Amino acid sequence: MNALQTFEHYIDGVFSYPTERFESVDPSTEAAWALMPQADAADVDRAVTAAHRAMHEGPWARMTATERGRLLYKLGDLVAENAAEIAKLETRDTGKIIRETKAQIGYVAAYYRYFAGLADKHQGAVVPIDKPDLDVTLRPEPIGVVAAIVPWNSQLFLSAVKLAPALAAGCAVVLKASEDGPAPLLAFAKLVHQAGFPPGVVNILTGFGPECGKALTTHPLVSRIAFTGGPATARHIVRNSAENLAFTTLELGGKSPVVVFNDADLESAANAVVAGIFAASGQSCTAGSRLLVERKVAQPFLKLLADKARAIRIGNPQRMETEMGPLATARQVAHMERTVAASIVQGAECITGGSRPRGLSQGYYVSPTILFSHDTDLPCFREEFFGPVLSATVFDTEEEAVAKANDTVFGLASGVFTTNLARAHRMTAKIHAGIVWVNTYRAVSPMVPFGGYGMSGLGREAGMDSIRDYTRTKSVWINTSDAPIPDPFVMR
Ligand code: NAD
């Protein structure tokens, strides 16, 4: 127990241990390595109360937008300087490979800098009102205390798209890290402190969903919920928000299609499919988990893919040469194994993978897996694995490709591979998804909105407009006439 590293909460500008703590497991060894603070409803209440106070009293409430931007720039610089250190913690706590955590956290700095720049550029308006003797202005004001909830994959990134626009807008935030792999966010709290945000503006804690998450999303002082996670939890969040009527955005899962036409550059398309489903061991909301390949090229393309999948270097996620680490939890492995087995029983062919890799007896490792079936009603085409499992099928016409791509309750991302420009335009118009990548996959930027259709969520994160979701508009009407108010019984 003594050998375990310990992490603290960050509430009202103070780091502390709560009475309850829980062990965090290193997914590459299955051994506990750290003790995490377990927030209960009282901790959540302290954090929300501190955030509410910070928003309405003290330096944050009086700061100009330019000053808020300066603090965000500083935070961006600190994230860039400390990316390597935090990446090591994220890799330790979630099993995500160090190559990716280093690069991703380095890029997270760009999100803070982007919203730092936007802080004093988000303006109100003067309305060209259709009535005489009235001046009407619209003032954007911070919406209130934000409850930000993230899952365990890419926590620095998923919190930046909430925290950065919220702080730019002048809100205060209580950020709940996932109970799985919270170390990188709890370490990030030190950078928030170092950047100099006044106490209570940013509070970072972790705990379990039904206790800590529920207390946060039902809290009466919370005005805005920004949630990323699974659709089942999202239903709880929406029900919870009935308590405080907080404006809620939801970033959920996906079952994203990648459509490969026979005129595509097959080598490049195969690399993009690998990036889409095997990078981050498939634990990505935008994972390109359904492959639709034109029948004429299906055989050579699937062979190319299977060869690439078998060549992936699986192992210790802290090594730079590793390409696939373990999954984050035993629960993820069990879900993946169950769904693969059910799909095979119902007729799917396993082209490669489907089992644990040889020589890795400890750790939540699974092999990159490719399943094939003509029947797309199988569980592997319907359920999100959140793991390295690609479900492939064929199509003959463009219409069939569109129908199969859209045959899902989700609609987060999609990929189209073709050298036919006209077809690329037709496909981007017809695919029901928040993101369409053409001849590329898995690209993101602070400048580009991110979010899904259908069961993939509500609202968009990143991009210029996302700051609007952290403000509310006050309409100010000023009478410029000295004349008495006319007929009080008629609406003006
Ligand atoms: P999850 O829904 O189980 O948990 C997400 C967060 O919600 C955690 O912090 C958890 O503690 C909290 N939570 C759980 N129950 C709660 C409750 N009753 N009230 C309030 N909070 C509660 O998700 P997960 O398994 O950790 O993550 C995987 C899911 O996240 C996948 O579906 C994945 O696609 C999705 N995801 C989506 C995006 C996106 O941007 N669209 C990005 C990453 C992951």
Image (cartoon, helix red, strand yellow):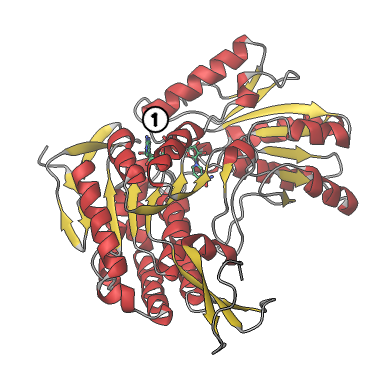
Q: Is mark 1 within 8 Å of ligand 1?
A: no
Picture coordinates of residue 142, whole percent (x, y):
43, 66
> Considering depth in this image, is 450 or 57 the residue closer to the camera?
57
When the figure is inspected, residue 361 is found, relative to residue 154, above or below; the finding is above
Q: Residue furthest top?
A: 345
| Quadrant the C terminus occupies | bottom right
Q: Is residue 173 left or right of residue 225?
A: left
> Considering depth in this image, is 439 or 197 the residue closer to the camera?
197
Q: Amino acid at mark 1?
A: Tyr
When the figure is inspected, residue 60 is found, relative to residue 363, above or below; the finding is below
Picture coordinates of residue 198, whole percent (x, y):
26, 71
Per the image, label 1 sits on a secondary structure element best described as: loop
The residue that label 1 is drawn on is 364
Q: Could you classify mark 1 by the number of other residues whose Cα lies within 10 Å: few (under 14), some (14-19), or many (20 or more)?
A: many
| Quadrant the N terminus occupies | top left
Residue 38, can we see it?
A: no
When the figure is inspected, residue 188 is found, relative to residue 366, above or below; the finding is below
Residue 305, can we see it?
A: yes
Occupied quadrant, residue 15: bottom left
Q: Name which residue lies at 55% across and 22% down.
A: 354
Q: Name which residue lies at 47% across and 31% down.
A: 232
Q: Name which residue lies at 32% across and 33% down.
A: 210
Q: Is residue 383 left or right of residue 115?
A: right
Q: Is residue 175 left or right of residue 24?
A: right
When the figure is inspected, residue 481 is found, relative to residue 87, above or below; the finding is below
Picture coordinates of residue 358, whole percent (x, y):
45, 24
